[in-house]
Amino acid sequence: MKKNDIYQVKIESFDVNGYGVCHIDNKVVFVLYALEGEEVKIKITNIHKKYVFSEAIEIIKKSPHRLLSLEEINNLSGECDLAHIDYETELKIKELKIKNTLKLDGYKFNNIIRADKTEHYRNKIMVPFQSIGSGEDYEVISGFYEKKSHKIVDTDDDILSTDIANQILHIIKRYLALFNVPIYDETTFKGIFREVMIRNTSNNDYMVVLIVTCNYNFDRLVEILTSEIKEIKSIYLNINDNKNNVLLTDDFHLIYGDKFIKENILDLDFEVAPKAFMQVNHEQCEKLYKEALRMANINNKMNIIDAYCGMGSITLNLAKNAKFVYGIEIVPDAIINANKNKEINNISNAEFICGKCEDEIVKLVNKEKIDLIVFDPPRKGCDPKFLDTVIKMNIPKIVYISCNIATAKRDIDILINNGYVLNEVTPVDLFPKTSNCETVLLLTRK
Ligand SMILES: C[S@@+](CC[C@H](N)C(=O)[O-])C[C@H]1O[C@@H](n2cnc3c(N)ncnc32)[C@H](O)[C@@H]1O
């Protein structure tokens, strides 16, 4: 067997990332975009010692669970790696991924919390721009990067973005082409316009951030955008002349409207700054927080730590029923945001601490008896020093919210080896059409 060889195979099962699985010459072969039960022609893409990667190039016998043809999949961003599968099967794959990664017994596994809306749910998108051709053929395109390349696939109708976000992108693209605004070229580092970030709230207020290499007059674009899209409440320029992949710098200039847009999460108001972390799916975020709060089972005698707290959306929801909550977060702007959110909601029993969780938690060791810790770390999971302190503090209850079950598994094994038991696990589908999934896990001290 060698790269680019073609085979006709029957797909035996799914793997936890949604790949079809079959065997050739006793080797496990993972097949991108093939479904269990299908007969497909595949092309070998990558050969490892024990397993092989391939992609489906022709569907000979189609599964009833297939939603999209191979041609239709090509028009979607690589992020939508499960868009070709019906939602029931997608949910089964996600549950399987969580169970198989945890590889543990003796805990309660709850059904995945499903989404009502499986398309157009994202409240934040970052979209790169490129120019192609010259003279009469000059064109500005925007969309997503083609798989394993830095070529952009032009799209005006992204399946995960809202219709309004798609309209905003279309207007910007038209404007840039019409007024010949130089588009940034990441190979020569020349040009001005790099990317657009669009965020929105559940009541349809939009913030647009134009990411450019230097200050530029966009008065006319602002006029067009705000007259055509009434939902736009805020427009920023972000000046980014870095030659690396950093998407946003701290150099923001408000060029229209409000400094923040306002989101309501479980009856609390939050001011959202351009750089603030907010879960990308509002409806599912509320379900995720509700599930974490159910597992936390708080009362007004409890002192709590909310580690990796972002703009305080979990912290302040915990504070509603707790004695006191400490929120810890590394990004200074998020802490400014969190303190403002505390004030807006008239909450006095919370304190936000700026710094690394692994450093700041140590300072709380002798301060107070902590009854519960909630942590919602980034994809890389928790720092070992942080987990070590949690264990030493003998905190009776942990609610771990994870967007990456592989790193959660690593961290949970450490906690289990140091006196904790895993009681309950609930996956929450925040990212329909993709193989990503949030999970809430409850651990208690033996
Ligand atoms: C997945 S987000 C969770 C935010 C928040 N809990 C929410 O639901 O909106 C992770 C957060 O951890 C922060 N962070 C990353 N590394 C950190 C560290 N070592 N110490 C403290 N915060 C950190 C990030 O800035 C980000 O706000």
Image (cartoon, grey):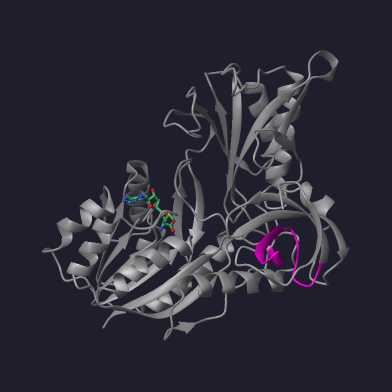
Q: Is residue 75 or residue 170 the one in the foreground?
A: 75
Residue 381 visible in the picture = yes
- Identify the residue at the far right of this view: 60
Relative side of 379 to 59, left or right? left
**x and y percentages locating residue 252 in the rendered image:** 46, 30
Q: Quadrant of residue 173?
A: top right
Residue 319 visible in the picture = no
Q: Tell me if residue 33 is in the magenta stretch.
A: yes
- What residue sits 72% from the left and 17% below the top? 180
**x and y percentages locating residue 365 in the rendered image:** 15, 63
Relative side of 353 to 123, left or right? left
- What residue sits 49% from the left and 69% below the top? 101
- What residue sits 50% from the left and 75% below the top? 426
Q: Which residues fall within the magenta stretch?
A: 20-38
- Count of numbered labels shown in the rendering: 0
Relative side of 160 to 290, left or right? right
Whether residue 150 is situated above or below residue 213 in the rendered picture: below
Whether residue 421 is situated above or below residue 274 in the rendered picture: below
- Identify the residue at the far top of this view: 135
Q: Quadrant of residue 83?
A: bottom right
Relative side of 335 to 276, left or right? left
**x and y percentages locating residue 429 in the rendered image:** 58, 67
Whether residue 213 is situated above or below residue 199 in the rendered picture: above
